[in-house]
Structures are given as structure tokens and as C-alpha cells.
Amino acid sequence: MAGRRKRAKSPEEPKERRLSSRVQELRQKERDEKEQLARERVKFLSDQSSELCDDAKEDDVSTNEGTLITMRNGNDNNLDFYGSEEDPHLKVRRNLRFFNTQYLLMVQGKMSRPDLKGVTEASIVMKANAVLYPRKMIGDLPGIDVGHRFFSRAEMVAVGFHSHWLNGIDYMGAAEYQRDYAAYQFPLAVSIVMSGQYEDDLDNADVVTYTGQGGHNLTGDKRQFKDQELVRGNLGLKNCFEHGVSVRVIRGHNCKSSYSKRVYTYDGLYTVVKYWAEKGVSGFTVYKYQLKRKEGQPELTTNQVNFMYGRIPKSTSEIQGLVCEDISNGLESKRIPATNRFTYINSLKIEPNVKIPKSSAGCNCRGGCTDSKKCACARLNGGNFPYVDLNDGRLIEPRDVVFECGPNCGCGPECVNRTSQKRLRFHLEVFRSPKKGWAVRSWDFIPAGSPVCEYIGVLRRTDDVDTLTDNDYIFEIDCQQTMQGLDGRQRRLGDVAVPTDNKASESNGDESVPEFCIDAGSTGNFARFINHSCEPNLFVQCVLSSHQDIKLARVVLFAADNIPPLQELTYDYGYTLDSVHGPDGKVKKLTCYCGAVNCRKRLY
């Protein structure tokens, strides 16, 4: 990326303030400490991953649910801890979630180009060979279907789908791949990115004319300034023509709501049908390649190519049937109003027999919490902040519990460690789904790690709702059970300092059963309409802000992935099969309609 030119100063402008060597040393020390913190955090994750891998070797277990690392032994053979039978779509999703964690850690460390560092220098994504497909392959890659969207070039690099974050052509070299593909001439192209960066590109959907690489002005005006040569990627596309080898085509589009301001959509496999050299618009030689989309692939709709062109309502008045004074629109002689007995609230209601602990002391920070060594709330979070100050606050990764700043803290409402307490930031819609009843989706792009909503309802004791029937909107606060990994709950990052002297809530004697729950049956917010999925795009996070009793933690839903507009929001309800019983004591069964590739077929 080209640097921004500095404007020459006029004599009337004040001179830039010069800093003393002592101040410069202090600022450099602060930058070094932040970078070291990020590196230690990465090392901590790497150590955890290595321990899990070692355990897998000892127990002869090939699948590790908690890490994406593809380790290499001394013979350079991959030991794939995803497991050979795991669905490739899940591998891709876990890989991208892992990359996003590294990306946010680099942002927190204030490193330049955190998207690239998340894949290379300071990230175990590259250092531990966690690229999902480290060796380049011809054709489709498992788990990446036509229409798959990447939200930065770095995401494609992390997966191994397109290994260059700058070059438009990715290709195989003879030195590494000649043995595997002895019948071909090298280099051999495997993928191209159509991103409109060359003035000679021509895109007619199924047939595209692609301009080779090189001689391009990288300042962004798309002008050629020298002749292209038939080498590297250009030669790779020519060899694809000679051998009839298919090439993956990825289309890039501008997107204001994506964190990289771009979105890249996989368009499928194309064949190079011809190539030639000609004088380009700027008078320099350019190589042209005409590619034709192979038949028999799924159609790529406009919404898949670029979700910005999807039909997003401009106001709630465009949504029919949700809030309407007359659902007949005047066709009947009398109005037929649509009513709902559900009462909407945006903060928890507390039952009289539930005692909320007093507010904790809090930190002494001023303005916003920035120094993790001095902030008392950061110490509760293991000595670092769980959020990164990006896109109004993003959670770096799921944790056992997140300690946020509360009412007695000295920082202000805009502090990044109050991220989940801030106002609703996305335009959401409750809509009717074909098989699952009401559902929720967003009109906006939701970056991974962003808080979507808190689960709101009536805070009650679990014992008080055990006798209720036909109420599927009860959310058990199982923070303590998650920390202990009970009943198959997935363990999370546990470097937190949970206070042990808090006796605000009396235990019911059975630590395997959550003591409190949130009942949103008749009173609550839109979170009650978010459906279950066996492969969700949201995750549940327990958050403590006003007090430190984990049994009464707030339940907040965060984005697990980068979620495009109009994609239904879902989270895993976490039921154990055969765990729900009816009044007669018999096991109740409910079919799951989430439609995920690895759907468990039953909700409970």
C-alpha cells in the first residue's frame, strides 16, 4: 500500500513540536510493552495448543476441538488434529475464527497491518503451520463452496485458498510441485482474484478477460507504466491454457461495512480458453487471458457475488405483518389489527426472591481504561483487556467469563471495557422463517467479536421454573458449569481471577445445575427470537460488570464469524440429547431444522 504524501508546510504554519529524548524513550517503551503483551498472548495460545497436541499423541486421539494447529513432525509430515472425518466446512470456519483471534490480538498490540501480521510474523497461524491448506492444490478446496465470502485477502491466505495478499495470480512453482504434477509445465496458476485493479480487465460474468500481472501502478489509479512479461503468474496462466487446467476465480468488490472495506467471493472454476499479448490502454504490452466458467457448477447469484446488492429494507414500514394496524390493508370493512402479547423490555427484571450482590469496587482509571498493568478490571481478566478498541469494541476470543468495568469504576461510558453495555449498534430484523418460526437477521455487516445483544427477560431461580411447561425461552446461567467443563460444555480461555469470597448467592448444593435463569417467555427482548443452529454464527459469553457473582452473570451473544447482511443469526442452545422430560417423565424429542451440514437432527 502506498504511503500518503506529506503536504509541504507554509512558513505561517506552526512547527512540529519536538520531543525530548526522555519522552521519546518513554513512548517507545510503551509501544514495546504493548507489542510484548500481544506476543505473550500469542505464545500463551501456542503453548495451550501444543499441550493439546501432545495429549492427542499420548492418547492416540486425532481430533482436537480446541485448536486449529496443523503441527509438523521431524519428517515434515502433517499431523492433522482436525481429524480425518471432520466436515471440511467446519475446518474452514474454525480456521477463520482462529485467524480473527490473531488479527484482533495484533490490533490490540497496535501493530501495523494487523491483518498480515495475524498470518505471519507475530501469529502462530504461520509459525505453527495452522494454514488449513498449506500446499497449493488445483481445483476446488474442500469446505469452500461457490459463493463463499472472504472479508479480506488475509483470510484467503490463512485458509490457503489464495496465498498472495497482493498479487492477483497464485501459482505453483516447479521446485516444490514438479514431483506431484510431473506431466505439467511450471509455473502453473491455481487461482486469480478479479478485483478491478487493471484498466484492461473485462468482466462478463461467465466469460471474463483477465489482465496479467506486472507493470501496474500500485497507487490505485490502475495505470500501466511498463510492459508486462510472460513470467511467474502470467506464464502460469499460459501453462493452464496449454494443459487445460482449471483455475479458481475470486471476485473482489468494495464494501464499506467489511472491516477491510472489501469482500471476496468465490465464483467457481474457470478454464483459460485463449491468451494473447497486446498494447494496453496506456500503450504498454499487457497479457490478456480469456477464461470461461465451467458448466455444472452452482449458479452464482448477485447476492452471493456482492451482498451489498441484496434487498435490504430501508425502514420497518417495508416489513409486512410485524407491526400493522390493519393486516387486510383496507380490503375488509373493519380493521384487523395484528397484536402480540409479548412485552418488550431492554433490561433485566428481577424476581423478588433473587438477591443481586452489591456493586464491586471497580478500577480507578480516568476517561478510558488503557493501561492493563494499572487497571483493576484488567487484572481480573488475567492481566489484559478482553476487548480491542476496533469497530466500537470487539471481543478477541471467547472466555470463561469477561469482567467489564462497572458503576463504581472511574472510567467513562465509552471505555472499551464496557463494550457489551453500549447501545444496540446493528439494524436487526425479526422475520418469519420457513421452518423455524420467528428468526433474527441483521441489515448490517457484523464483524467477528462484536456484541450483538444481551439475553433479556425475568431473572429467576431455576427451581421456580422447573414446573413450567410449554416455555422454550428459559436460558440457564451456566457460567460456573462452563468453567468446570460439565456436561460436555466446551472449555474456554480460563486466565481469569474469579473472586472466591463472594457469598451473595446461596448454593443449592448441586453445582452441576445452574441456580439462576432468565425467563423470556412473555417478557424480554429480541434475543428470544434468535434460533438454534448446530453450526452457529454467534456464541454465548458470560459477562460480569456491576458485581462479581458468576452465578448471576449477564448473558451476552457475540459474533463468532464475520456475518454478512441478511444472514440469519443463530447460536447453539446447548441441549444434551434426552435431557428434556415431559410431565409424565418421558423423554421429549424435538427435531432440529437448522439445516447445517453437520446438524445433529435433534434439538433435544
Image (cartoon, rainbow, N blue to C red):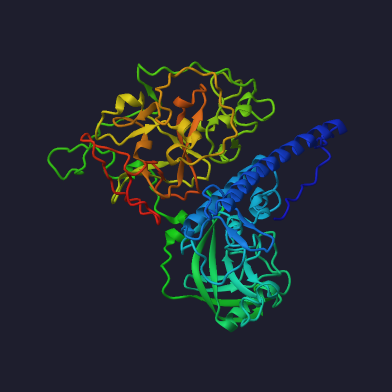
Q: Is residue 575 left or right of residue 214?
A: left
x and y, in percent, of residue 43 in the image = 68, 44
Of 571 and 191, which appears nearest the observer?
571
Of 587 and 166, which appears nearest the observer?
587
Q: Residue at x 65, y 31 (%)?
A: 383
Of 522 and 128, which appears nearest the observer?
128
Quick one: quadrant of the C terminus? top left
| Residue with the most extreme right position | 21
Quick one: quadrant of the N terminus? bottom right
Of 211 and 139, which appears nearest the observer?
139
In the image, is residue 59 above or below residue 85? above
Q: Residue 518's quadrant in the figure?
A: top left
x and y, in percent, of residue 81 in the image = 56, 55
x and y, in percent, of residue 56 in the image = 57, 51
Q: How many marks?
A: 0
Q: Residue at x 40, y 55 (%)?
A: 598
x and y, in percent, of residue 540 in the image = 46, 38
